[in-house]
Image: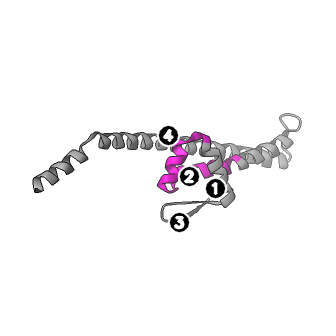
């Protein structure tokens, strides 16, 4: 009787469903990694953009020569854009890196829902992990 039970366990653990689960896990991990890298790169790019805009705005405030008419107005608009997008990119980064596993998977696998998930995190002001710890979204 004991050999039948162990044979059933062995056949279950090496069956095609295990291979499908393993393949699905690999696809999920690769997708999460890709989305993570995209979010990280976007966040870094926005920080660099924001820094360069702030440097130029400070120079203009210190009576630097304008490169074109209304450059100071453009800096204000560009800085507002960079701040808004940085907050959104920060929410995306937190969702893909620190959120609960189910939320990370949903974020990675459903690109059409990402914007809504980012807005939800921005509205709440934080992203929760699996244990309920909150990570503040910088805005």
Which residue does the numbered mark 1 point to in the structure image? 121
Q: Is residue 93 magenta?
A: yes
State the predominant SS element of the stretch in magenta.
helix
Q: Position of residue 80 (x, y in %)?
A: 77, 48
Check disc 3 and report its element: helix, strand or loop: loop
Q: Nearer the viewer, mark 4 or mark 1?
A: 1
Q: Residues within 10 Å of mark 2 (few under 14, many from 20)?
A: many
Spatial CA distance of label 1 from label 3 is 14 Å
In this view, 106 is above or below 124: above
- Whether residue 62 is visible here, answered yes or no, is no
Mark 3 and mark 4 residues within 8 Å of each other at the beta carbon: no
Distance Cα–Cα, label 3 vs label 4: 25 Å
Instruction: State the quadrant of the N terminus.
Output: bottom left
Who comes first in sequence, dot 1 or dot 3? 1
Q: Are marks 1 and 2 in contact (CB under 8 Å)?
A: yes
* Residue nearest the viewer, comparing 110 with 78: 110
Q: Is residue 18 visible?
A: yes
Marks 4/2: CA–CA distance: 13 Å
- Nearer to the camera, 79 or 64: 79
Of the image marks 3 and 2, the number of the one nearer the N terminus:
2
Q: Could you tell which of marks 1 and 2 lies nearer the N-terminus?
A: 2
Query: Looking at the image, is mark 4 or mark 2 earlier in the sequence?
Result: 4
Residue picked out by circle 4: 34
Say whether residue 19 is magenta: no
Q: CA distance from mark 4 to mark 1?
A: 20 Å
- Residue beneath label 3, please? 133
| Chain part drawn in magenta | 85-112
Find residue 35 and report its horizontal and vertical position in percent. 53, 42
Quarter placement of the C terminus: bottom right
Please report contact status of discs 4 and 2: CB closer than 8 Å, yes or no.
no
């Amino acid at each position: 009787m004991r050999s039948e039970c162990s044979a059933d366990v062995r056949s279950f653990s090496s069956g095609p469903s295990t291979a499908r689960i393993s393949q699905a896990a690999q696809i999920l991990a690769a997708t999460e990694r890709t989305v993570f890298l995209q979010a990280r790169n976007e966040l870094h790019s926005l920080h660099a953009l924001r820094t360069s805009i702030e440097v130029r705005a400070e120079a203009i405030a210190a009576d630097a020569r304008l490169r074109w008419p209304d450059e100071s107005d453009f800096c204000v608009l560009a800085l507002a854009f960079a701040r808004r997008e940085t907050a959104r990119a920060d929410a995306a980064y937190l969702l893909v890196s620190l959120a609960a596993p189910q939320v990370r998977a949903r974020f990675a696998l459903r690109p059409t829902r990402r914007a809504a998930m980012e807005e939800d995190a921005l509205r709440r002001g934080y992203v929760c992990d699996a244990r309920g710890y909150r990570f503040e979204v910088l805005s």
